[in-house]
Image (tube, rainbow, N blue to C red):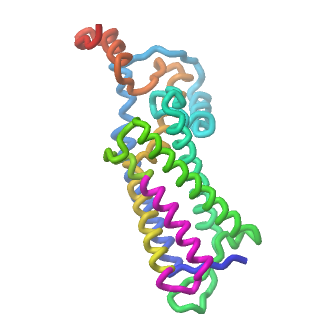
Amino acid sequence: MIELYLPIPHLWIIYGAIALVIEMVIGFAIEIGRGVLALSNLSRVLPIKGPTRNWGSAGAFIAGLITAFLYPFYGAPMTSCHTQSIYLRRPRVKAVAHALVWWGFVFAAISTVLGFIYDEWVPSDVPGLVAFIPGGKLGPMGPYAVIGTGAVGGVLIIVGFILMMIARWQGTRPVGEPAVTDFFLWTAFFVSLSGFALMGIELTMPLNYYALATAFTVHIFLVAMMFATMPWTKFGHAIYMYIWQLYDRYRTWKGVEPRLLGPWSGELAERALESHVPSHPKKHS
């Protein structure tokens, strides 16, 4: 059985996780209110026509909820947010990078949830260290499930991040150009690296308090930073897209209004504005 050690009490981890969840809920509520939900006002400016149905409210809502839940499997991250344009029309490397980071985070999240719920904490004779068995309550294979899914997620995130930087070098955007949304990519990358470093120390020198404390402190700081800033980074797309898909499909299938394809930009948006808002100045020939 795999037994690991951490230089922090179990209750501290629980309290910290609760505080992070509360902060994230507040942050997402603010950003969703400011962003995605405000898109409903687009119908007054860009009433783009699209296919509608005449389902009942309950049927349309259930169908929209199912579609939104399944969207990451049949659409995201191979489509871009809100525009529903095929993401593979962009550089192939960037599309693959998005997919790797997305599914890497999914595997890492599964590992974290399994560990948080099913870890088995046992008394430790080592001063300053708390012993625990990751996924111990799941049986003999529990630790391997927790560590294995986490390792797979970390590898996918690291590879995806590297491919994303390669895409930047190809000219989609300068690597050094600052972007708030990229903060999630960078923190996820360093969380993965620090996680592997912590795993290495746990497996090679489990009783070295100072090495464990340093590695764990760096790792948990990066994890907390990543989760605390999620509502304002690229990770927000994973939440906002669910809401947008639910809203879009519900309104479409219920037949309340024409389907909205999203906050368009460029020539297509200009043409739509000209056709529905005569006073809008023309910007194309």
For the N terminus, the image quarter is: bottom right
Residue at x 60% of width, y 92% of height: 125
Read off the magenta span: 186-211
For the C terminus, the image quarter is: top left
Which percent across, then down, holds residue 93? Answer: 53, 38
Say whether residue 179 is left or right of residue 152. left
Q: Nearer the viewer, residue 58 or 161?
A: 161
Residue at x 54% of width, y 72% of height: 198
> Which secondary structure is most common in the magenta stretch?
helix
**Magenta stretch: includes residue 205:** yes
Residue at x 43% of width, y 52% of height: 184
Res 71 → quadrant: top right
64 over 118 or under it: above or below? above
Say whether residue 31 is left or right of residue 66. left
Q: Looking at the image, can residue 106 be seen?
A: yes
Which percent across, then down, holds residue 250? Answer: 53, 28
Q: How many discs mark residues in the rendered view?
A: 0
Q: Nearer the viewer, residue 229 or 35?
A: 229
Residue at x 42% of width, y 41% of height: 168
Q: Nearer the viewer, residue 254 or 193?
A: 193
Res 24 → quadrant: bottom left
